[in-house]
Image: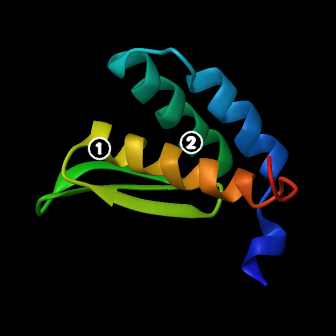
Amino acid sequence: MTALLIDRETIRELLARLEGLKSDARREVIFTAAIESGGIFHGPVAGNAVLHLHRIPVVGATEDQAIDAWIRKARDVIAEDLPAGL
């Protein structure tokens, strides 16, 4: 049921904004998106950075690893919309 609440268009737009950005710029875009959408982005505490954005939760040892994990998971969510064979 949660999958129905995921706004895939917003995720696509965020992924497009992140494309080609370097580490600091990516962090800024993610941090801003988390604030604007009520998400969570915390730096490493007890060995993990936490990112929960647009109903996609991830953790990573660093902020960059959490962002990388979120991007991978977000792409998987978007890929679920594509017809088979694409």
Residue in the picture at 53% in, 55% down: 73
- Position of the N terminus, as image quadrant, is bottom right
Nearer to us of marks 1 and 2 is 1
Circle 1 residue: 65
Question: In the rendered image of this protein, does residue 15 appear above or below residue 28?
Answer: below
10 Å neighbourhood of mark 2: few (<14), some, or many (≥20)?
Answer: few
Marking on residue 85: none
Residue in the picture at 40% in, 41% down: 67
The quarter holding residue 50 reads bottom left
Circle 2 residue: 35
Give amino acid for label 2. Answer: Ile
Give amino acid for label 1. Answer: Gln
10 Å neighbourhood of mark 1: few (<14), some, or many (≥20)?
Answer: some
Residue in the picture at 75% in, 73% down: 3
Residue in the picture at 83% in, 57% down: 81
Question: In the rendered image of this protein, does residue 69 appear above or below residue 64?
Answer: below
The outermost residue toward the right is 83
Residue 39 spot, x, y in % from top left: 56, 54
Q: Earlier in the sequence, mark 1 or mark 2?
A: 2
Residue 47 spot, x, y in % from top left: 12, 59
Give the SS element for disc 1: helix
